[in-house]
Amino acid sequence: MPDTPQPAGRRDGIVRAAVGVFLRFGPRKTSMDDVARAADISRQGLYLHFKTKNALFRAVVAQMLDDLRGATWQALGRADHTVEERLTGAFEAFHAVTVEIVDRETYAETLRAAQAFAAAPMNRLEHDLVTDVAALLTQSGRANAWEAAGLSATDLAQHLFDASAGAKYESASLDEYRRRLRVSVRVVTRP
């Protein structure tokens, strides 16, 4: 049975509160009571918006993907920034949220649960980022420096994506992540 339509503002507030709860406890350990407390709503009120924890988790994942897309492409599209700043900002927006997560096992569980029903949109988001980074590297002329080495703009963009993804797991802090990411961006965008 689909969720009963409720006022969008309240529903959005619940979803935003639930994001933090799911990231903290994971989908298995998160309870509707936890979410209700975080959203400052009664459990019964929560069930008016979301009939099941699974429906709520799906809404949380959709919200996280929307937020991720918005923040990433906003950074990538900043024409008032250098190419290096745009790339660094985009990858930071895409990956850095996971750097400061304390319990990586819980995050991994959350990611696996999300992939069970949202693998296609998650993969599309990654593909779109690599495609748009490649376009920026081409438009800015930065990909030209690598042609003699047989590397395309897409190769470079995929490398940056992979380096950014790896750095998020290897970095103990956001500052360390940024440092690692800036090195990768500087290497790829060298004159």
Image: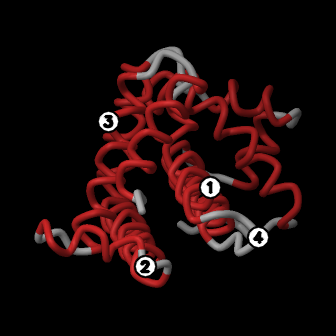
Of pointers 1 and 4, the one earlier in the residue sequence: 4
Q: Position of residue 76 (x, y in %)?
A: 60, 67
Q: Position of residue 79 (x, y in %)?
A: 71, 75
Of pointers 3 and 1, the one earlier in the residue sequence: 1
The kind of residue tagged 3 is: Gly
Q: Total label count?
A: 4
Question: Could you say which quadrant of the image residue 39 lies in?
Answer: top right
The nearer-to-camera label among 4 and 3 is: 4
Residue at mark 2: 141
The kind of residue tagged 1 is: Glu
Do the residues bearing badges 1 and 4 touch, measured as CB atoms within 8 Å?
no
Of pointers 3 and 2, the one earlier in the residue sequence: 2
The Cα–Cα distance between marks 3 and 1, rounded to whole angstroms, is 19 Å
The C terminus sits in image quarter:
bottom left
Asked if residue 137 is positioned above or below residue 123 in the image, the reply reads below
Residue at mark 1: 85
Q: Which residue occupies 65% across, 73% down?
A: 77
